[in-house]
Image (cartoon, grey):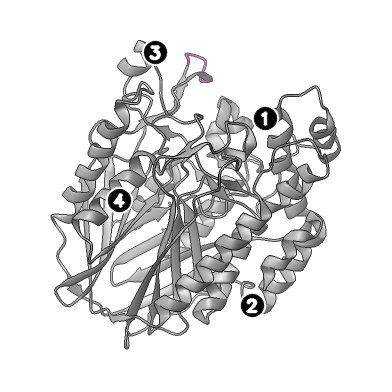
Amino acid sequence: MTRTLVDKPSRRLFLGTSAVSIAAGLLPASAHGFQPPGNLHVGTFRFDVTPPMGHSLCGGWIKPVEAVDDPLEAIGYVLLGTEKPIVVCVVDWTGLLNNAHVQWRQALAEAAGTTIDRVTVHCVHQHNAPFACVDAEQIILEQGDLPHIVELDFFRRCLDAGSAAVSQAMKQTIPVTHIATGEAKVEKVAGNRRILGPDGKVASQRSSSSKSPEHHSLPEGVIDPMLKTVAFYNNGRKLVASHYYACHPMSYYGDGRVSADFCGLARKQRQQQEPDCTHLYFNGCGGNIGAGKYNDGSKEMRPVLTQRILDGIVGSEQSLDPQPIESVRWETFDIQPPSDKRFDEEQLMRLISDTTQQVVGRNRPSYTVAWLRRTAAKLPITLSSLHVNNVSLLHLPSECFVEYQLRAQAAVPNRFVACAAYGDGGPWYIPTAEAYPQGGYEVSVAWCDPAIDEILTHGIQSLLGSKKA
């Protein structure tokens, strides 16, 4: 299994994984015509991914685990009955990047008896959680004095748990006959993080929390206020409900207390309310979206934000109207975004080796180097979509700006489009081309060239069958 590759140096690791992925069916990307649903079945799974005491959180530059307020989960489903099985999974982690993301998909694919191109894995992006890049881990291990990015033994245990959970799900499937969609506006959560000044540059960052009265008084800006739900049914029985909303999911963090935070807690509450239905929560294109307009970062605000997301989930489900499934299609599209020429591997390695730098100034560049080595190895990012009737579930990488989600929905107004971002997190932020000259934090940690806009947009158009976005 590909997870054995975590013990090899990063460059060889990527090349080896690329070869495995090609053999497994990742390359080239595939597109198939609409298929009749056949004998559709679904099996659901969940497994614990809570890091152990002392484990790094968010890449090792905030306080490590010292307590667990609520456990972290990986939740998903396997859809059978249309060609090879399809696996959809979402994880309560900050991110899964580069080869770590490939290894998760490969492990779940093998357990489901399918190919890696038919597996999508996403993160909710909580920050008191692991930020897993095994390539960056290899880079910092060579330094000998830096905190872990992700502990490899723990990472392997999660892969093993995922394999076991999917294998068990394959033995306990239920027929799927209907699909339903709904949406509801979420009140007082999301706001655009990037406050532009008169010169068109980012003048202030609203982020996930803020105590600034100005940040609270300014408009929400460009967001997607709607929480969308897509549910699978066995006749009148709801089996799986996937919820999608675009916003950074942190109320507060950095205190060493592991939590699924307000979005994950809302999902857990809905799960308790409906124990016979598996509920999943996906972060949409929330790269430039946070709760800072409405959140002051106090502990009292976490349950308030949780309730607002839960209200959105429940509200979106009120309009669910199950329709017979008539067609199913899985489609993938590979992209190869170029690295931004601002970043030089030799210079970054000098920063990583500079013991006078703070941990964040050394660990963070390891993610950049991992991306540079990945692009040199020409390992692509796989976009995918699941189309059922007039519903499209769009699976995107990293921290995409909300504009990509809005474009996707506008491109095919006759379809119900739900976007899950935070898939392969290798590129870190994915701004729009217009955002690059505006500057700001997100642009400073966007490893791709601005050409990513056209490349990603073309991939989205291809998956949706649209000629404009």
Q: Is residue 332 visible?
A: no
Q: Residues within 10 Å of mark 1 (few under 14, many from 20)?
A: some
Q: Is 110 part of what is drawn in magenta?
A: no
The residue tagged 3 is 212
> Which amino acid lies under the numbered mark 1 shown in the image of this protein?
Val
Q: Is residue 62 above or below residue 202?
A: below
Choose the circle earlier in sequence order: 2 or 3. Answer: 2
Q: Which of these two is toward me, 291 or 33?
A: 291
Q: Locate residue 460, reporting x and y percent.
A: 48, 57
Q: Which of these two is toward me, 440 or 317?
A: 317
| Real-space Cα separation, disc 2 to disc 3, in angstroms | 51 Å
Q: Secondary structure at mark 3?
A: loop
Q: Residues within 10 Å of mark 2 (few under 14, many from 20)?
A: some
The residue tagged 2 is 24
| Real-space Cα separation, disc 1 to disc 2, in angstroms | 36 Å
Q: Is residue 154 visible?
A: yes
| Real-space Cα separation, disc 4 to disc 1, in angstroms | 32 Å
Q: Is residue 279 toward the left or the right of residue 457 in the image? A: left
Q: Is residue 273 above or below residue 127?
A: below
Q: Mark number for residue 268? A: 4
> Which amino acid lies under the numbered mark 3 shown in the image of this protein?
Ser
Q: Locate residue 355, reporting x and y percent.
A: 82, 26
> Which amino acid lies under the numbered mark 2 shown in the image of this protein?
Ala
Q: Secondary structure at mark 2?
A: helix
Range drawn in magenta:
197-201
Q: Secondary structure at mark 1?
A: helix
Q: Locate residue 34, reporting x and y percent.
A: 38, 79
Residue positioned 30% across, 51% down in the render: 268
The residue tagged 1 is 360
Q: Nearer the viewer, mark 1 or mark 3?
A: 1
